[in-house]
Amino acid sequence: MAVSGSKCRSCKEPAVIDLPRHNANFCAEHLLQLCRRQVTKAIEDYSMFSPDDRILVAVSGGKDSLAVWDMLVEAGYEADGFYVGLGIGDYSDESGRFVHAFAEERGLTLLSTDLRSDFGYDIPTAARASKRVPCSVCGLSKRHLFDKAAIDGGYDVVVTGHNLDDEAAVLLGNVLHWDVDYLARQLPVLEARDGFPRKAKPLVRLTERETAAWCVIRGIDYLVEECPIAAGNRHLHHKDVLNAIEKESPSTKSAFYNNFIENMAPLLAEHGSVSSGDLQHCTRCGAPTSGEVCAFCRLVATASPHEPVPVELVLGRRGRR
Ligand code: FES
Ligand code: ZN
Ligand code: ZN
């Protein structure tokens, strides 16, 4: 990470990181300061939450979710963690270890659930049983469980570690397909509605390189490896495309995302505020749903009777990049 010979923009001490999009280099302390400033700005500009709110941070063991949990606790927020064991072989075992170690070392409250022991399935099995791509059943499971944990625990907001790279990549995908429904809801904060909790993404102004630097400087051990069955998905390809553009023309990525939020999102606001129709309570779990049984309970019914599918089989079917 060190940048030989260069100096921090703020204090002129030796720099540890260069950030072309800011056209500057930073020492460890001033990099942390930059991260804090960007997170505070996101929380305030988008009215994400206030110091009185109880926050539930969805943690995966990766750099972003642990960094955002660390930043919120450091800033004095009341933030607990929530971890979902996805049953993706060694990847999930490792990620669970990082999350538990982080919480224990800092004396933080960590809630958790495990798909296999609590619901009788895991992500590879659910993908095979439902004939859907793993990321789709994974997203559905996590969204449902985050919402439920927040509502049951009386939390005011669910925080996720989505960073600028994630959001810009998803935005690019939505733009390429002109998916207006998704575009209208691709906001840094979504208000609580129809029985769903408020959701916020305080890292939208930081890149993944910056959150990784935060973790290294703050001594946070995180799982570096990416999810093995997400390799090759559309989202990662869009990240590569944006990185190639960013390399040629620094700060394009942040302009792409920030100008969307500033200039386009307000034009789509009305579209996004349309309610998802008449919602009722799922007859099995009580979650809001448009049908009788919610998508999560339907997935549990499909996946839990299925013989467990080892993660290698899902890998073999999708291939690696
Ligand atoms: Fe969800 Fe990989 S973490 S599919
Ligand atoms: Zn400095
Ligand atoms: Zn349900």
Image (spheres, helix red, strand yellow):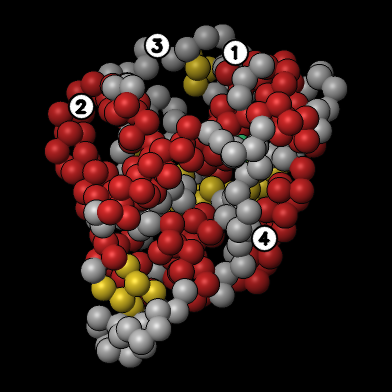
Residue where numbered disc 1 is placed: 293
Q: Which residue is mark 4?
A: 98
- The type of residue carrying mark 2 is Leu
| Mark 4 sits near ligand 1, with its Cβ under 8 Å away | no
Q: Quadrant of residue 199?
A: top left
Q: Position of residue 144 (x, y in %)?
A: 56, 31
Q: Residue 141: x percent and y percent? A: 60, 31
Quadrant where the image shows the C terminus: top right
Q: Which residue is disc 3 drawn over?
A: 278
Cα separation between marks 2 and 4:
39 Å
Badges 1 and 3: C-beta atoms under 8 Å apart? no
Label 1 CB-ligand 3 distance < 8 A: yes
- Comes first in the chain, label 4 or label 3: 4
Residue name at image x 40 percent, y 24 percent: 194
- The answer to whether residue 63 is above or below residue 19 is above
Which residue in the protein does label 2 denote? 268
Q: Is tag 3's residue or tag 2's residue first in the polypeptide sequence?
A: 2
Q: Is residue 272 above or below residue 68?
A: above
Q: CA distance from mark 1 to mark 3?
A: 14 Å
